[in-house]
Image (spheres, helix red, strand yellow):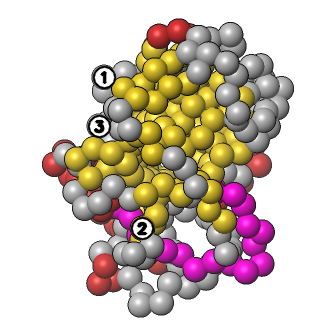
Amino acid sequence: MRQGVSVRIVRQTGVMADTKPESTKPGGTLRFRVEDRTRGIESSTWSLVGSRKSGDLYFSGREIMGDLKLSMHESGITRMAWTTIAAASRVATETDRVISRWTASHPLPAGWALVLRLSIPDSSLSEILPPIPERPTKPTVTLPAAGAGRTIEVRVLLGEPGCGGLRLEGEFVEVGRMTLGDGTLVWVTAWSYPTTPDAEEQLVSVRARAISDGASERPVPRVFAWGTDNDMGIPFVLDAGDPRPPEARPPVIPRYDGPPDVVVRTMSAESDRFGVP
């Protein structure tokens, strides 16, 4: 059984206090997903892992963290790259294991910055996967689905060591807080927005490309894409879920605990890249 952790919905204003907040300790992991038990659908489970000794922060799907992850380094450089172990069998010796690289963050007041946007459209939510009894349960924050025609956008904010307080205006869910090894603060929030026609078109394009590359042959395919936010220059990740149309999905979802077998393909410059675990 998956373990859920309740979160509070913050309405009107969310405040990161000047005092040090309760948060995951350095070296900890924050896991989260969007879920709607009534409709029997969910997103992929995503993980943020904080460094115990530095200001580095790592992000990826829970199932593929050991192969492919986004690394947000205290140097200001962010990279999507194969891990050292995965690169040994996937990348030629003379080839860089880094797939994408960013140097931008979106500055906010009092020493804070927005460093990552994750988009989870309601139309990308897929059938809830059956639990693997042998797999140990991990605390996971369960976010409420936004509903048809809407998108959950998860934002990762970093506060440099010694930063001041930050006030966010609007209605959002606080996903969690972390502290990194160098004292950097991490605040993760989730917002709900109407899904735009352009965003839905992008989702359809990513799924179609995954199908054309053989995603349907996998037991439980899950797709995501990444690129660069046009306005802020920061990494943008799209959770595209199961790319198969509903009529092509099996009536009984199989339990699968094998290797993720991550495949990465390049799309157009606008969509950048997508991955299928």
- Image coordinates of residue 49 in percent, x first then y, are 70, 41
Residue 237 quadrant: top left
What's under tag 2, amino acid-wise?
Answer: Asp
Instruction: Give whichever of discs 1 and 2 has the lower sequence position.
Output: 2
- Quadrant including the N terminus: bottom right
User: Residue at coordinates 30% horizontally, 23% vertically from top-left?
Assistant: 231
Q: Position of residue 139 (x, y in %)?
A: 69, 57
Is residue 27 rendered magenta in the image?
A: no
Q: Position of residue 205 (x, y in %)?
A: 27, 55
Left or right, 59 with reference to 34: right
Which quadrant of the view contains residue 269?
A: top left
| x and y percentages locating residue 230 in the rendered image | 31, 27
The residue shown at (50%, 25%) is 15
Image quarter of the C terminus? bottom right
In screen coordinates, is 32 left or right of 13? Answer: right
Q: What is the number of the mark on residue 231? A: 1
Give the vertical position of 205 relative to 95 (above or below): below
Check residue 270 in the rendering and tell me which mark sits there, or answer none: 3
Magenta segment: 124-140
